[in-house]
Amino acid sequence: MSAIAAWFTPEVIAVLIGMVKAVVILLVVIIASAWMIWVERRLLGLWQDRWGPNRVWWLGIGQVVADMVKIFMKEDWIPKFVDKPVFILAPAIAMVMTLLAFAVIPIAPGWRIIDLNVGVLFFLAVLSLSAYAVMLGGWASNSKYALFGGVRAAAQMLSYEVFMGLAMMGVVIQAGSFSFDTIVEAQTGLWYVVPQFLGFILFLLATIAATHRAPFDIPEAEQELTAGFHTEYSGMKFGMFFVAEYISITLMSALVVTLFFGGWHGPLLPPVVWFCLKTGLFMCFFILLRAALARPRYDQFMESGWKVMLPLALLNVLVTGGIVVALAAH
Amino acid sequence: MNDIKRILIGFWSNLVTLWLIFAHLWRHKDTVNYPEEMPYLPPRYRGRIILTRDPDGDERCVACNLCAAVCPVGCISLQKAERPEDGRWYPEWFRINFSRCIYCGFCEEACPTAAIQLTPDFELAEYDRQNMVYEKEHLLISGTGKYHDYNFYRVAGMSIAGKPKGAAESEAQPIDVKSLLP
Ligand code: SF4
Ligand code: SF4
């Protein structure tokens, strides 16, 4: 007995607890993202003056289970003309990379998978990799609509990633750290949405582009490209792209909350509840955007990205940096 | 300067759009929760077809076959028969295949006796396709349907037992052509 107990040194226990946390966060994120499909369908319905799917179980929350069963039953067909290894790899990259980025998001005090001191950079790196999924998927499909989707994804990525990183820099300068934990701690008194309002707007626009959601769903624009980069995908491979998109909405909402809305900070309720509440609100906001706004042309998007957003983001970094340095000099 | 103005106006108009769409949350919903909440269907809605009776309780259908002829999908079939006691015509059998019917209402338009009528019942669903074929006993109802007072034999010139020529409502007495000789 004591031989077994000897295995459980404090380090091993710490690792085990970390693993359990990771699994819990993973499951919660996946389930929440999957259920968002239902939330989206209901909300879109309500905003379009209809009820949406409200039949399966209470309020229709079982709709996701029904959809899942259906998509698992579907034939997972690989067209003959595709580049097979890349074609199969792309949805996996989409899924893994978006999930990986969750590792650095602090959900509550002590509830995170890792606290990297370069958390923000890690996040940006993983996000760039996840954009590859869309490009590879589009390129490997070997069909014109998918290729257009892939090309647009590349163009879009080039335009939003730059000002997204710069928009985050304002927060990083103010908090004086790349670690998400420190950033959240620094927002105890005042959420960064107030001093960094411009950064918040820019970052929000970039997150919409990063999730490939309407109004910036340029790589998959149904009306122009049938389904864009995932035109050739079917069955669960399509399902993975689909769920990855919802996971990335969850991720981006969590990120906006962490960077600009004080993360877990909030009165009365426990931190986890505050975090989930704020994230949920932002997820609903993403759906509202899809329900309300029209899609710009992709040259318009790139133009605004390079000519408007980037200078504004640079200006934001400059002014924030100047103020921080001036205050430090006092 | 102009560009900045354009950007700000665009931003503002998008925000207004967001708010307007959000406000749809508490608008009246155009759809209804169907099985629990039935939608209102007007009496002239074109649904399940019935055969009606005249105010005296006799079958209205005179087996003229006009409905079967006008039906664009040819889903009505019937067989004429004659009542021995008064000479009235009636369908011996009358069959509508509802799995082909497109509910166009042409049969009701064509019918000279207001016998065949469409009703606001749309809940026709069966597991077995054969059950969609309705026979006369399924179609014939005991009432008059939408037209309460119409009785074909009372207004038409057709003579049957108990109603000779000239006895119909607002029908002139038949003229004896031979008495008209100069
Ligand atoms: S409604 Fe139209 S299709 Fe149906 S039985 Fe009448 S004529 Fe035929
Ligand atoms: S239902 Fe009307 S149109 Fe059809 S056979 Fe009978 S009387 Fe004629």
Image: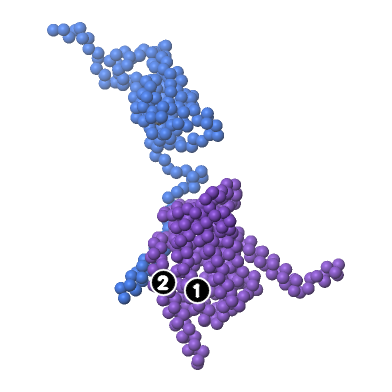
Chain colours: A purple, B blue
Check if mark 2's residue and mark 1's residue have beta carbons within 8 Å: no
Residue ranking furthest to the left: B182
Return the residue nearer the eye: B38 or A17. Answer: A17
> Number of callouts in the render?
2
> Which residue is disc 1 drawn over?
A165
Q: Is residue B84 above or below residue B19?
A: above
Residue at 42% x, 50% y: name it: B30
- Say which quadrant the N terminus of chain A sits in: bottom right
Q: Secondary structure at mark 1?
A: helix
Label 2 resides on the chain identified as A
Return the residue nearer the eye: A248 or A83. Answer: A83
Residue at 78% x, 73% y: name it: A9
C-alpha gap between disc 2 and disc 1? 13 Å
Answer with the quarter of the image where residue B179 lies: top left
Q: Position of residue A274 (x, y in %)?
A: 57, 70
Return the residue nearer the eye: B3 or A286. Answer: B3
> Which residue is disc 2 drawn over?
A306
Answer with the quarter of the image where residue A29 lies: bottom right
Q: Is mark 2 within 8 Å of ligand 1?
A: no
Which amino acid lies under the numbered mark 2 shown in the image of this protein? Answer: Trp
Q: Position of residue B106 (x, y in %)?
A: 36, 30
Left or right: B152 as drawn, with respect to A28? left
Q: Secondary structure at mark 2?
A: helix
Answer with the quarter of the image where residue B150 lies: top left
Q: Position of residue A150 (x, y in %)?
A: 48, 60
Can see residue A89?
yes
Which amino acid lies under the numbered mark 1 shown in the image of this protein? Answer: Gly
